[in-house]
Image (tube, rainbow, N blue to C red):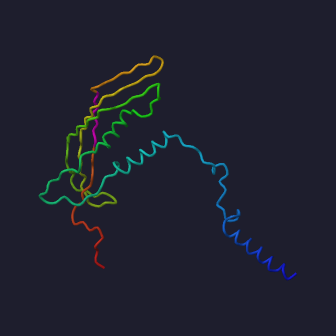
Amino acid sequence: MAYRIPALRGFALVAIATLSSGCVGITSGPDLGFFGVPIPVSPYFQKSEEDEAWDHERYARAPILGPITAGGPAVALDPPSDDEVVRALERAKPVQGGLPFLHEVQRSNVRIVKDKIADYVDPPRFIPLIGPAQLHHAHYKCTIYYSETTRVGWPVPYTVQDAEASEVIYVDHNHFHMVGDVDSGASAPF
């Protein structure tokens, strides 16, 4: 009988350790049922979501810069990047998503010419969540020269090459300039 009590204590200790460690269903998470099974996502939808997030992160937001200095030039930021121009072209005239061996379109020998067509600053006004600011506009005309190859595989296989294809894309870059005495709050005295 003396040996049974330590054995029961040991068994109870192992049971408590097992229940509290998450090995048994008491501390496991909620049961999602059918929704707990992973569902495959089409690469098309995954790529479209990634492209949308990339565009929002890189190009869809208007930055807020410091005030325009007196007597200084009020010129715009950098012209649009090649990535931004090619993405805008892809939205206007998509190439991706062809059917292999049935219909494929490829662009090669891409050359981009960027021309600034307008650069002006609006008068100061109050903008909610920003305060008094000026909107700086910069408009660019981007001409894209490329050679396009279209391959059709059914019903009659043929290839069409357009060596002198071109498209014109207009890109607008806008950003804000703060107006007046700007206190960011970073070096406020206590």
* Residue 108, position as x, y percentages in the image: 32, 32
Q: Nearer the viewer, residue 103 or 56?
A: 103
Quick one: quadrant of the N terminus?
bottom right
* Residue 190, position as x, y percentages in the image: 31, 79
Q: Residue furthest top?
A: 156
Q: Nearer the viewer, residue 133 or 95?
A: 95
Q: Is residue 166 in the magenta section?
A: yes
Q: Is residue 78 above or below residue 5?
A: above
Q: Residue at x 42, y 28 (%)?
A: 104
Predominant SS along the magenta part: strand
Quadrant hosting residue 126: bottom left
Quadrant hosting residue 168: top left
Q: Is residue 163 above or below residue 122?
A: above
Q: Is residue 70 left or right of residue 94?
A: left
Q: Is residue 172 left or right of residue 100?
A: left
* Residue 84, position as x, y percentages in the image: 32, 43
Quadrant hosting residue 64: bottom left
Q: Is residue 67 above or below residue 44?
A: below
* Residue 188, position as x, y percentages in the image: 29, 74
Q: Is residue 79 in the magenta section?
A: no
Q: Residue furthest left?
A: 71
Q: Residue at x 68, y 64 (%)?
A: 23
Label total for image: 0
- The segment highlighted magenta reads 165-171
Q: Nearer the viewer, residue 106 or 119?
A: 106
